[in-house]
Amino acid sequence: MPRMSLRPASAPSSSARPWVIATRESRLALWQAEHVQALLQSLHGRPVELLGMTTRGDQILDRALSKVGGKGLFVKELELALEDGRADLAVHSLKDVPMDLPEGFVLAAVMEREDPRDAFVSPRYEHLDALPQGAVVGTSSLRRIVQLRAARPDLRIEPLRGNLDTRLGKLDAGQFDAIVLAAAGLKRLGLGARIRSLFEPEQMLPAAGQGALGIEIRAGRPDLIDALAPLKHQATWLVAHAERAVSRALGGSCSMPLAAYATWQDGRMSLRAALGSPQADGRLLRAQADGPVADTAAAEALGLSVARQLQEAGGTAWLAAPQG
């Protein structure tokens, strides 16, 4: 897809203006925004422009997100652009979108999911089990940390922040023996060859919404709801609601090691979730449920039932404890 020029940060001039997509300026975020841009232009024959922005989440790289405000730091500036009319829609990696949007904003569409799995990336080792004792693995995701420690408590897990290219650069510079990344981002940027192996959900459950793109707009825009309808993927829409319901019910944020992953086929959904201990020491609570799901209400109900299982299994006490 050809790279489109970014639109200057100026206010719209008329109702006939192009639609404007607010996006972060990382290579992956731009790919995602350009993907939506091309689809909308093809569907509607209307110009679509990009408004590139740097978010607080992009600027703060020396501290864990859980210490400085969470994943909402990646979307706040984009929401401000929607609020003041500089942009009409924002494209996000759904796993970065807070479970509760601010008043006046809605998630208008969730697009078909890419590979939701986590990827093992290493210049020397084929998979997690091939790492020598005490090997250094890079990730700043608490969800990944607790599952890695559950599988390999002997490993040294070190923080790794920055965009995808920055993380790969640190690996190539020899700072880590391996790193764990979302497979979807690598594949979207044509970097699938960097993946040495994939973690199946049985090995490492993904984050809620991982691999899916969410499109956020201001409420009260029926024109955009209609325009975005062809981009909404029903199966991904439903599983995303179920996964996000688990996280929302547990007060979900990046300071909580929580995984949730659902599949939907022939009207039935299967949902699994895992909650890590507050000390991020590899202890996990697990829960699952399945049943008929035909709409978002049923998907969210299934998510709430899995969240209750985790709470009753001891998760309520874990959530109240200080995170390690």
Image (cartoon, helix red, strand yellow):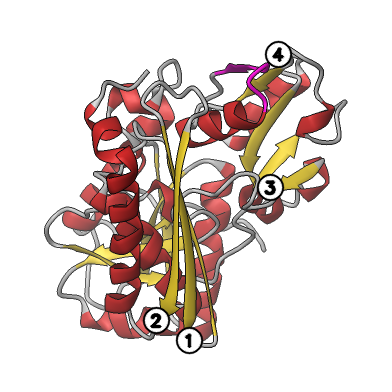
SS for callout 1: loop
Measured in 3D between alpha carbons, the distance from the residue under mark 2 to the one under mark 3, in whole angstroms, is 31 Å
The one of 197 and 8 positioned closer to us in this rendering: 197
Three-letter code for the amino acid on which mark 1 is drawn: Gly
Q: Which residue is mark 4?
A: 175
Disc nearest the viewer among 4 and 1: 1
Disc nearest the viewer among 4 and 2: 2
Q: Which residue is mark 2?
A: 293
How many C-alpha atoms fall within 10 Å of the one at disc 4: few (<14), some, or many (≥20)? Answer: some
Three-letter code for the amino acid on which mark 4 is drawn: Gln
User: Where's residue 1, x and y in %?
Assistant: 67, 63
Q: Is residue 138 left or right of residue 34?
A: right
Whichever of labels 2 and 1 marks the residue nearer the N terminus, that label is 1
Q: Is residue 219 left or right of residue 51?
A: left
Q: Which residue is mark 1?
A: 267
Whichever of labels 4 and 1 marks the residue nearer the N terminus, that label is 4
Magenta stretch: give its range. Answer: 152-158
Measured in 3D between alpha carbons, the distance from the residue under mark 3 to the one under mark 4, in whole angstroms, is 20 Å
**Residue shown at the point (67%, 16%) measured from the top left:** 154
Q: Do the residues under discs 1 and 3 have CB atoms within 8 angstroms?
A: no
**Residue 143 in sight in this render:** yes
How many C-alpha atoms fall within 10 Å of the one at disc 3: few (<14), some, or many (≥20)? Answer: some
Q: Is residue 269 above or below residue 139?
A: below
**Residue shown at the point (41%, 22%) measured from the top left:** 64
Measured in 3D between alpha carbons, the distance from the residue under mark 4 to the one under mark 1, in whole angstroms, is 46 Å
Whichever of labels 3 and 4 marks the residue nearer the N terminus, that label is 4
Q: Is residue 22 left or right of residue 282?
A: left
Whichever of labels 1 and 3 marks the residue nearer the N terminus, that label is 3
User: Where's residue 114, x and y in %?
Assistant: 61, 62
Q: Kindly indicate the quadrant of the structure image that contains residue 315.
A: top left
